[in-house]
Amino acid sequence: MTENLNLNPITYLTWHWMKINNDTIQVNPSFTENSGKEEKLPQGVSLTKGKAVSTELEEPQYSIGSEAASLISENAKEGKIYTIKGTLKEPLIIRLESPDGCNECCQQIIHALPDSKGEVIIVSSSEKDAGGMTALLTKVFLEENAQIQISKVQLLGSAMNQIDETAASLGADAKMKFISVELGGSHVDQGFHTTLLGSRSDFTSHMGYLCRNDQYLDTNQTVVHKGKKTTCDMFTDGTIKDKSTKVYRGTIDMVTGCSGSVGNEMENTLNLSPDAIEKSAPIILCGEDDISAEHGSTIGKLSKDVLFYFQSHGIDQALAEELLSKAKIQAAADKIGAESIQEEIKEFLSAI
């Protein structure tokens, strides 16, 4: 049995004919739980089962929408809670390996206690030609002065579909970095929703992607500024080619009371095919006067000057396009704090 599921709703509706207000997919609502495996628990990380933590921070909102988030949470019977205390000397690496034909989901909570520091890396993978559906819901709570990097790497098989949500609430002086590398899959809905609750909290994201063949990548990225003097920087950089489609929704929401806050978002897309489709909706919402916010989106092919530079060094157009496409991925991958994961990304790229 399958049913339609609406995902990644835009903050404010635009013209329906643009087909960017949301994404709709068919799913089997009866997921099984795949909670993943930890390579090991670094000192300073404790693991318990559950789907809620004790915190004064607000419950995060969801970029994928409340309907999809509830469906994932209800099917993830147990869930996992990773509590971080102190400074991690090595990243926590969580692997979600999905078998062919799966219909599975996972819910996890990352709870960083005050003054804690570290990185959590979540890798989604499957066999090269595997198909199925995997849904991942990651909630993040950063208490006062916590500094955490969440890195997500998607290396799924060519016929696999995925829903991937990262929802975060940040306390005063908390800092979160979010790194995302999107390479595999057939139809992927990916996004994050971050609420900067505490004063001087800070969020930075870097996303690198490569869409090829007939892949469909639908993204929805939102940062809500509530605390005073909060900051965010959102960077999305990737390549579309062949008959692939990439949808980008990026929203900075400056609500009343967030005086002194600064927000920036920038999306850059390299389009290597006349048949590839890019839809982009960068949005800034202002409910406060004393703020600074900027956004932008660029879509284009290789310029003649860039091609001339490569050709003058003996590099033809096809190789130049390949090098630049992989460089965009590498720029995001280099920010991940585990060489073993960086090597996996390189191996995946080399096999494309």
Image: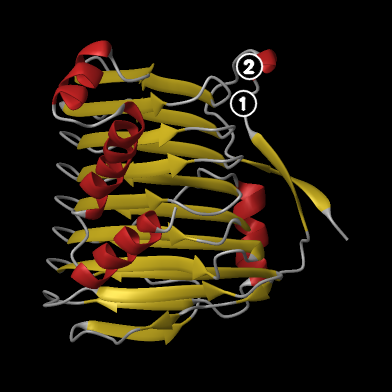
Residue 31 relative to residue 313: left or right: right
| Residue at 21% in and 24% down | 311
- Residue 220 lies, with reference to residue 55, above or below; the image says above
Can you identify the residue that label 1 sits on? 21
Q: CA distance from mark 1 to mark 2?
A: 8 Å
Residue 150 percent coordinates (x, y): 29, 59
Q: Residues within 10 Å of mark 1 (few under 14, many from 20)?
A: some
Q: Would you place residue 346 above or below residue 266 in this image? A: below
Total numbered labels: 2
Q: Does 111 appear above or below 326?
A: below
Judge left or right: residue 50 versus residue 132: left
| Image location (x, y in percent) of residue 73 | 60, 65
Relative image position of residue 62 (x, y in whole percent): 51, 47
Instruction: Measuring from the top left, give residue 126's x and y in whole percent.
Output: 53, 70
Residue placed farthest to the front in the image? 314
Q: Secondary structure at mark 1?
A: loop
Residue placed at 52% from the left, 23% from the top?
279
Amino acid type at circle 1 is: Asn
Tag 2: amino acid: Met
Residue 325 appears in which quarter of the rendering? top left
Q: Which residue is mark 2?
A: 18
Can residue 225 be seen here? The reply is: no
User: Is 16 on the left or on the right of 88, as rendered?
Assistant: right
**Residue that appears at 30% across and 20% down:** 295
Q: How is the image coloured?
A: secondary structure
Secondary structure of the residue carrying tag 2 is helix
* Front residue of 189 and 256: 189
Which residue occupies the foreground of this view, 194 or 322? 322
Q: Quadrant of residue 93?
A: bottom left
* Quadrant position of the N terminus in the picture: bottom right
Is any part of residue 81 visible from this angle?
A: yes
Say whether marks 1 and 2 touch (CB < 8 Å).
Answer: yes
